[in-house]
Image (tube, grey):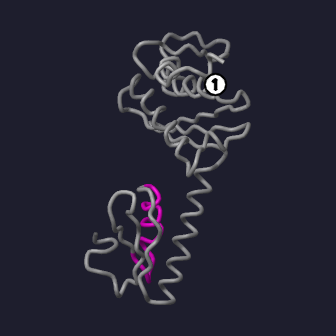
Amino acid sequence: MDEKKKSIDELLSDLGVLEEAPVEVELKESGKESQTKGPKEVLEEFLVGLLLRLDPAHYVEVRQEGNLLRAEVKGGDLGRFIGKEGRTLKAVEYLAGVVLAKHFGGAYRVVLDAAGYRKRQEDKIRRLAEEAALTVELTGEPLPLPPMRPSERRIVHMLLKNHPKVTTESHGEGEERHVVVYPRDKAPPGTGEGA
């Protein structure tokens, strides 16, 4: 029971996020006795430590592509790990970035996914953009899409950037920022590629 009552500071300290304590979880691989750990090993160590506290059925696969580290969490029930609208997943990704920044400065970036959640979300945004383009093409009227995060809006803009009949522009502030899909011939000045 005492394990469940740990404060967030104690948990983060145990995982090596806070300055006070080194990471206690060790990878159980033979032959890896090196003193200096690379970014992949540091990220794996942090995520494994966190996942063991959440559900021992979870495991992580990390790939390094230059300065980008892609981590995929698999196994067990990942619903809680992903959280509502991916918020928990995004928070853990942020913490993983903090851990890497603590060890290596801003040299590395982390992209965290769980059971293909991010890929499914990206596919959903792509379908929404394609359907919106078709609707605007047929009706000739602008179509506002629902509010989206910056990364989601970027997907829409990039997908429709070279579309022959429609163009896009972001509108609104903060949580209400959204993309409007316009017919190319009725778009406001500065919309699309020129914006």
Q: Which residues are magenta?
A: 151-167
Image check: 52 left or right of 47? right
User: Vertically, is 46 above or below 163?
Assistant: above
- Give the labeled residue for mark 1: 53
Q: Residue at x 56, y 76 (%)?
A: 131
User: Vertically, is 124 above or below 188?
Assistant: above
Question: Which picture quadrant has residue 186?
Answer: bottom left
Q: Position of residue 55 (x, y in %)?
A: 69, 30
Q: Residue at x 38, y 32 (%)?
A: 107
Q: Is residue 160 magenta?
A: yes
Image check: 180 left or right of 74? left
Q: Is residue 119 magenta?
A: no
Q: Position of residue 13 (x, y in %)?
A: 48, 18
Q: Position of residue 117 (x, y in %)?
A: 62, 50
Q: Residue at x 59, y 34 (%)?
A: 62
Quarter of the image that includes the N terminus: top right
Q: Label 1 amino acid?
A: Arg
Q: Position of residue 57 (x, y in %)?
A: 73, 31
Question: Which picture quadrant has residue 128?
Answer: bottom right
Q: How many marks?
A: 1
